[in-house]
Image (cartoon, rainbow, N blue to C red):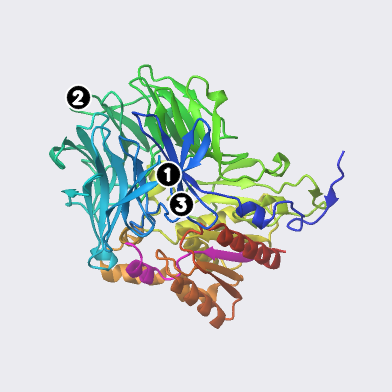
Amino acid sequence: MTMKEIVQYARWKSPLSCEAATARTRVISSPRVNIKSGRAFFTETQLDGRITLMEITHDGLVEVLPPSYSMSSKTDEYGHTAFDVLSDDRLIFSNKDGTVCVLDPNDSSITVLAAHPLLRYSGFAANMTSQWVLGIEEDRTHGSPKRIRNRLVAIHADSGQVSILTRTAEFYSSPNFSYDGTKIAWVEWNDLSQPFDAAQLYTALWDPRGLISNIELIAGHERESVAEPRWSPDGSLFFCKEEGEHRQLFRVQPGASVAAQIRAPCLENAEIGGIHLFEGSRTYAPLSERHLVASVARYGVCQLVCIDLATGACGILAGPDAMCLIRRDAVARLSESSALVIATGTRSTVALYEVDIYTPDAGKVIRTSTDAVHPQTLLPSLERMTIQPTGAPLRTMHGCLWMPRNPNSIAPVGDFPALIISFFTSRGFACFTVDPTGSSGGYGMTYRRKVFGQWGIIDADDLAECARHLIQTGLVKHDGVGVIGCGAGGYTALQALVRYPSMFAGGACISGISDLKRFHYTTDKRESVLASALVSASDDARRDCVYRERSPLFYADRIQAPVLLIHGKTNTIVSIEQARLMADALHKSGSEAKLVEITGDEHIFSAPASAALCLEEEEQWWRQTLL
């Protein structure tokens, strides 16, 4: 029996170093399969942040992209759906320099199809009967975010011809061909109509000359949330749409004029289909006329299921230990009975799985996000929590709690762990992740819509209410609560520090926003439009006034807790100026602040070295401020 060392929380010795947690990690995404040949591919990041392409073969994984290339689209600055597989197994992709290229995986030869400094491409979807590929073209000729134009286009993979199919909407998403190549489907929305509430799904007949006809509106007639159109091998078109509180699954069968809802027990009081501001969500896949594999979300937890379309019966394909979070570009049809799925579990790291609907327990792990093997005894148990706040408005909040766990350490009697949102529990910290008001992920339409008009207020209040609950229930120490967030979450963290100065002992803001007006005029068009919608002002003058009222930069003197700011120098979503101005304002008000600028990285720290530096800074900061 191993004797445990009695050590104060947050001072535990952990065998998991920052380097071990990041140096051998990779981001896995975008599984793709040629339905004719069966060849399968996916993307993953390398140690230097480069995104490469891997092929799944019988002999193992093979990297097919030459080292001088990186599969990366910069549309809307994030970039999504950067490749697809052509009918002849070649791959079309967007390179890091903005060029559109075709790769032959057999010899790694590359042909440049399109190269224009002001045009960016993503959303690739190949026609399995020809060399045409659908895509989204982003035109930055006029420079400013407000004047960026998006178009739905078709690109010929041999000639490089680009044919504009439609340009009437502000934004496009999820274009794809039917299996027989005769029809296309896509989602679009306009400036003030975010995809969360007013997207429209269209179909059209495809002309092999690069044209479309007979455009038909399928869904989105009455300000509906529509997402993830997918064609089935039998010619049916599936899509997800909010029906009442939750987004549900619908199907238009061949020859039918209206969509019918798919009813299944696993879809009750749950949501299917990812809906995001940015293009590229794939969370379900029709396998055949009979079966469909899907990630179904309920109160922030995903479940992989197989739906029998004939009977409505549901089968659970994986438990939460292996799969509890499946999102973004994560699911692809492999065969009539199997799918490729990227998921993470409560006790497992992110991995790419091959899942067979008839033998789900025999699921095959194809690739994990890390080569490091961590003892199961270091992995904490997840506890879902529902919290009723003491303040107005009346609402229910949701989150996940991970308490400290280390097989070699135990805290003294009467000691409580500090609370850090998103950090290592093996060091003796508790971690509570909040799905604040406005979150999607199975909470329903009402919960999601509550943040509109209240951004920067109700979400910041949620953080404080959750911290108060954990303190009052005796789970964490009253003077050891830290708050941390990234991007919009970083903004929420700063707002929480402004609105509740005595609640938090420390704060950290990663790639976060401090000045909403500055953000509105300097970020990408989609982010700018969303920010305006979230404050819901009646006109531009009122909007700018609200922006100032809810910008932490102008209330830095209210913040009492020390603040750590970490920001990428080349961040094009939230400029480095946001962090620099906030640091200066905090220093001028007499508050303690530290600014760490990450060289060579952007909004999301994709390079392991950047992620390791971020973790090191966080750990030092929390030990300094929470103990």
The CA distance from mark 2 to mark 3 is 42 Å
What's the amino acid at mark 3? Ile
Q: Position of residue 493 (x, y in %)?
A: 52, 62
Snapshot quadrant of residue 593: bottom right
Identify whether 403 is placed above or below 557: above
Outermost residue on the top side: it is 311
Q: Which residue is mark 3?
A: 51
Disc 1 or disc 2, which is closer to the eye? 1
Q: Position of residue 557 (x, y in %)?
A: 53, 77
Confirm or deny contact between disc 2 and disc 3 (CB under 8 A). Answer: no
What count of labels does the image hold? 3
Q: Which residue is mark 1?
A: 328
Q: Pick the residue in front: 200 or 51.
A: 51
Q: Earlier in the sequence, mark 1 or mark 3?
A: 3
Label 3: how many Cα within 10 Å (few below 14, some 14–19, many 20+):
many
The CA distance from mark 1 to mark 3 is 17 Å
Q: Which mark is residue 396?
A: none
Position of the C terminus by quadrant: bottom right
Snapshot quadrant of residue 13: bottom right
* Magenta stretch, residue numbers: 503-524
Position of the N terminus by quadrant: top right
> Which residue is drawn at the image coordinates 34% and 71% (left, top)?
545
Disc 2 or disc 3, which is closer to the eye? 3
Confirm or deny contact between disc 1 and disc 3 (CB under 8 A). Answer: no
Q: Pick the residue in front: 171 or 181.
A: 181
Q: Pick the residue in front: 92 or 500.
A: 92
Q: Which mark is residue 256?
A: 2
Residue 9 visible in the snapshot: yes
> Which residue is drawn at the image coordinates 19% and 49% (left, top)?
161
Q: Earlier in the sequence, mark 2 or mark 3?
A: 3
